[in-house]
Amino acid sequence: MISALAPVSIDSSRIRTEIQSLQPQLSDWRRRLHQQPELGFQEHLTAALIQKKLQDWGIEHQTSIAGTGIVALLPGQAPGPVLAIRADMDALPIQEENPVPYRSQHPGRMHACGHDGHTAIALGTAYYLSRHPELFTGQVKIIFQPAEEGPGGAKPMIEAGVLRQPDVDAIIGLHLWNNLPLGSIGLREGALMAAVEGFELTLQGKGGHGAMPHQTVDSILVGAQIVSALQAIVARNLDPLQAGVVTVGKFQAGHTHNVIADSAQLSGTVRYFDPALAGFFQRQMEQIIGGICQSHGATYSLDYRAFYPPVINHREVVNLVRSVAETVIETPAGIVPNCQTMGGEDMSFFLQAVPGCYFFLGSANLNKGLTYPHHHPRFDFDETALGVGVELFVRCVERFCSSSQ
């Protein structure tokens, strides 16, 4: 059992001072990664940089897991439990607009979500723990994961066995978060982030002259009614105490002003927190689309896909992280309880496999203009958060291992 009240036996001020001295290196690693952003399962330069650092530091590691993934293994001073730390590596297909010297050198690709920072924090944690095995018993696995932004690297890494040999007892991870100020964290027990599902819908009607609609089956009319009716899934079919989102993000049909379109394409996303809702939205959507199409004489093809389940944190590991954060986070912003977002994350697959906690680390700084949201072409964050992230991870390792004995 994990006890949040277990004593910390290591001089915490020493840990902080030593990690703060790593800040220039953390920023340098992050900026080098930022300049070479790579999309999911294409993180070859990123993996090469990580591998080189681990080799230089003499850290045991495996490469080419699920393509470009890497797992580092750090032993403590004696046998004991195994804690995993997960960091994602991939970037986004976005053209960077930041006028900074470390801006992306890869056109149309950008670290616009902070994964370069996650990787730098994980590297810093690996380096520090390799130099201080006296801090912990047991072992620490650091998982560098590809393709979080899509199509998802967590599940193939799990299938490749990263949680085995040795078996992982618990896992933690963080997401730099520009929705929170520097010097704060957001965490909660239960659902932190939403399930991610998506759909592609093709409607087939009958085209014709815009002045003779009685001779046609108007796919735009059918699609418009479907868009409106889909909102009733949340408004009139979902318990008001449950959260859910159905968004139609694309609606394409027609070619000119006086021709009724014979077909239309719609696509969108579905989000929810409650795992019990798996399958619910797809069933409702099939009924609504089928009924509207039948009433108009149209046909349809629906491709509905469940991508990531919700990110569900476990109480004992959340309590452990909170107990560490209470000693690390010293700003008035502090710990933000019940922090949630309808954004999704494939960290959820790790949390389905073993107990764990995923949390948000505040990284925005209004005074420096570092407030652009994630996935924005001007996204950037205060790099001071990197050292805070390393300290949180290191002290979670020390606390977890001492409390699991």
Image (spheres, grey):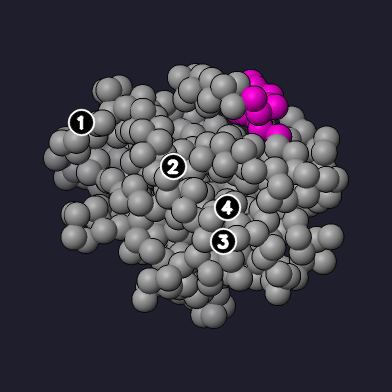
Report how far apart the C-alphas of labels 1 and 2 lie in the structure.
21 Å
- Element type at mark 1: loop
**On the rendered structure, is 301 left or right of 349?**
left
Q: Is residue 44 visible?
A: yes
Please tell me whether mark 3 or mark 4 is closer to you in this view: 3
Residue lying at 36% horizontally and 76% vertically, measured from the top left = 332
Picture coordinates of residue 147, whole percent (x, y): 52, 33
Q: Amino acid at mark 4?
A: Phe
Q: Which residue is mark 2?
A: 22
Residue lying at 53% horizontally and 25% vertically, measured from the top left = 53
Q: Mark 3 or 2 closer to N-term?
A: 3
Please tell me whether mark 3 or mark 1 is closer to you in this view: 3
Q: Mark 1 or 2 closer to N-term?
A: 2
Residue lying at 73% horizontally and 70% vertically, measured from the top left = 6
Q: Which residue is mark 1?
A: 101
The quarter in which the N terminus is drawn is bottom right
The quarter in which the C terminus is drawn is bottom right
Q: Which residues are magenta?
A: 58-73
Q: Amino acid at mark 2?
A: Leu
Question: Where on the picture, by quarter, is residue 142?
Answer: top right
Query: Is-magenta flag for residue 257?
Result: no
